[in-house]
Image (cartoon, rainbow, N blue to C red):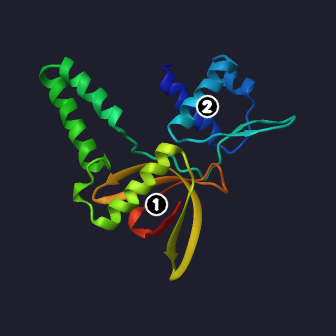
Amino acid sequence: MSKISKNIKMLNILSSGKVYSCKTLSEMLEVSPRTVRQYKDELEKEGIYIDSVMGKNGGYKLYSRVEIPSILFNGNDIKKIELILNKLSGSDKLELENIKEKINTYCRLVSDKDDLCVEDKWKVNTIQEAINNKKKITIEYFSKGIKKSRSILPIQIYVYGNIIMVIVRYSEEPNDIRHLNLKRIENIII
């Protein structure tokens, strides 16, 4: 079983909401406890946060309400696809080029800010700065006509279709990953 398959298997095991010790996970995945910790670190680098539960019955837990983004690409992913494309020829190359175009159509990073309005540019730049510095920000937004505010840790900005989305982690609930529509954000306080 490949490394990525074992990462997915670990996520499936943890999605039950139960706490699993590192030793139990290592036995289930047929890897060392050290490798389980490496998988946890890798998943967290990709924005999937696994809680460490301390104590006698401690271990790892993935809260069931964590929403694992189904489409998450960054500039490095696209560059890797392009590197592979340069090495391919024939129908394989054509097939991968089609996949790359689908990715670009449905999910792209917000890197070209020229087509954004001034207000959106400010929001994107402010959020991107917080992402780069791994800093929390407070957003103000309206929900059912009531102005609310929430402290968040932004993780990534991307475009899905023609909607700018922000993947965030709510500070108060460490494993609560959500997608926010940039248009809903009224103000950002650094």
Residue 61 in the figure: left or right of residue 110: right
Nearer to the camera, 126 or 101: 126
Residues packed near mark 1 inside 10 Å, few (<14), some (14 to 19) or many (20 plus): some
User: Cα distance, mark 1 to mark 2?
Assistant: 25 Å
Whichever of labels 1 and 2 marks the residue nearer the N terminus, that label is: 2
Give the residue at mark 2. Answer: 40
C-beta proximity under 8 Å, tags 1 and 2:
no
Residue visible at 53% across and 50% down in the picture: 67
Residue 179 in the figure: left or right of residue 103: right
Q: Amino acid at mark 2?
A: Lys
Give the residue at mark 1. Answer: 180
* Total numbered circles: 2
Residue visible at 28% across and 56% down in the picture: 161
In the image, residue 29 sits, relative to residue 131, either above or below, namely: above
Q: Tell me residue 44's x, y (percent).
A: 57, 37
In the image, residue 77 sits, relative to residue 105, either above or below, namely: above
Q: Dot 1: what SS?
A: strand
Circle number at residue 145: none
Q: On the image, which quarter does residue 116 sit in?
A: bottom left
Residue visible at 21% across and 24% down in the picture: 85
Q: Dot 2: what SS?
A: helix
Residue visible at 45% across and 49% down in the picture: 129
Nearer to the camera, 189 or 29: 189
Nearer to the camera, 95 or 189: 189
In the image, residue 79 sits, relative to residue 124, either above or below, namely: above
